[in-house]
Each structure stands twice: as C-alpha cells, then as structure tokens.
Image (cartoon, helix red, strand yellow):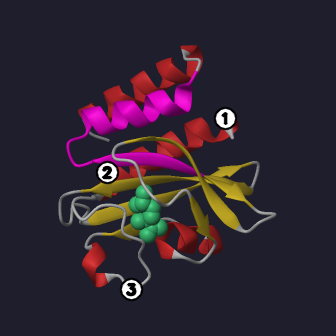
C-alpha cells in the first residue's frame, strides 16, 4: 500500500485506541486527508426493518437517512454483501443521488463475526477516482472498525 494510506492506517489505529467517538473521527480523517474522498460515512444494517440507517459521516448533509435494502448502491451492497465500485454514477441506474457534485462512489460491507453489520460509503467529486489501492486501504479500515458496530 502507498505511504499515504499506510500512515492513515496508523492514525486510524490511534483513533480506535483513544477516541470517544472513533467512527466520526475516522470519517473526518478520511475526508480531510484523501483529496478524492468528498463524503465519507457509515450506514448501519437494520436487518429487522430491512433498511440501512445513516451513522456518523463527514461531508454535506444527505436526505438518505434510511435506505431500503436493494435501493441505490448502498442498498445493493446490503443485499449482495460485496463491495461495489461505481466509477461514474451517471452510468448506474440504481443510484440514489446525494449531491449533484458526486461523480463516483465506493461502498464496502463491514462484517463482524461473519454478519454484515454496516457499510462504509465514500462519494467522490472526481470521475474514475478509485484504484485497487483505495479498495485495499478501505477494506483494511472496514476490518479495523468492525468491532465498533
Ligand atoms: N449514493 C448512495 C446513497 C447514499 S449517499 O451517497 C450518502 C446510494 O446510491 O446508495
């Protein structure tokens, strides 16, 4: 992994070990430090009601506080359980727009003890911004935060 992502993982570890609101701080950190991450947030899986519920986030307020499983990119990850990388949201039919500035999105599932418990959602104002390095980095972040859900 590149040095920026490596040093961010060290800071994530520090936040997880010491912060009173680690999930919020991690959203703030990723949004501030990675130029192509313009909205960073967690959605929590509510299996009983089959909806995703917005958790801590950094970036513009969103109307998508609750998302039914199956709807939008996040809802598809809730239903399918696997990461979705959308490099151009205009090319995606099942997409819920948060901001007209958003051009791309990555949504990663967060598993705790084999259960899909949450998601990490990142919107970008850039087109085609996400690399395999992003995915590796964000997978590692998801594994680290899983015990907080
Ligand atoms: N675009 C997402 C909705 C959540 S916002 O990006 C914060 C989707 O299609 O699921």
Height in image: 10 above or below 44? above
Q: Is residue 26 magenta?
A: yes
Vertical side of 34 occupied by 64: above or below: below
Q: Quadrant of ligand 1?
A: bottom left
Residue 120 horizontal side relative to residue 118, left or right: left
Alpha carbons under labels 2 and 1: distance apart: 24 Å
Sequence-wise first label, 3 or 1: 3
Mark 3 touches mark 1? (CB < 8 Å):
no
Residue 99 left/right relative to 107 = left
- Residue under label 3, please give it: 93
Q: Is mark 2 within 8 Å of ligand 1?
A: no
Q: Is residue 84 visible?
A: no
- Identify the residue shown where x is 54% and y is 45%: 142
Q: Secondary structure at mark 1?
A: helix
Mark found first going from the N terminus, 2 or 3 = 3
Q: Where residue 33 sits in the image (x, y, percent)?
A: 26, 33
Q: Label 2 belongs to which residue?
A: 133
Residue 23 position in % (x across, y down): 54, 33
* Quadrant of the rendered image containing residue 20: top right
Badge 3: residue crowd in 10 Å (few <14, some 14–19, many ≥20): few
Contact flag, marks 2 and 3 (Cβ < 8 Å)? no
Q: Position of residue 132 (x, y in %)?
A: 32, 58
Q: Is mark 1 within 8 Å of ligand 1?
A: no
Q: Residue at x 64, y 74 (%)?
A: 79
Q: Is any atom of residue 111 visible in this view?
A: yes
Query: Is residue 40 found left or right of 89 in the rendered image?
Result: right
Q: Please identify, in this view, whether the residue under mark 2 or under mark 3 is nearer the observer.
A: 3
What's the magenta region?
Answer: 21-43
> Which residue position holds label 1?
148
Left or right, residue 141 beside residue 85 = right
Identify the secondary structure beneath mark 2.
Answer: helix
Considering depth in this image, is 123 or 138 the residue closer to the camera? 123
């Amino acid at each position: 992994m590149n040095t920026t992502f490596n040093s961010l993982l060290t800071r994530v570890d520090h936040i997880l070990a010491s912060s009173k609101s680690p999930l919020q701080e991690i959203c703030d950190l990723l949004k501030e430090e990675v130029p192509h991450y313009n909205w960073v947030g967690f959605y929590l899986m509510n299996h009983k009601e089959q909806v995703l519920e917005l958790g801590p986030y950094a970036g513009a307020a969103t109307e998508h506080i609750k998302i039914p499983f199956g709807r939008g990119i996040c809802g598809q990850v809730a239903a399918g359980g696997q990461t979705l990388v959308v490099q151009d949201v205009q090319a995606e039919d099942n997409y819920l727009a948060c901001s007209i500035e958003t051009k791309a999105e990555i949504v990663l599932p967060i598993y705790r003890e084999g259960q899909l418990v949450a998601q990490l959602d990142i919107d970008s104002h850039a087109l085609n911004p996400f690399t395999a390095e992003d995915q590796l980095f964000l997978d590692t972040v998801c594994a680290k935060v899983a015990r907080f859900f």
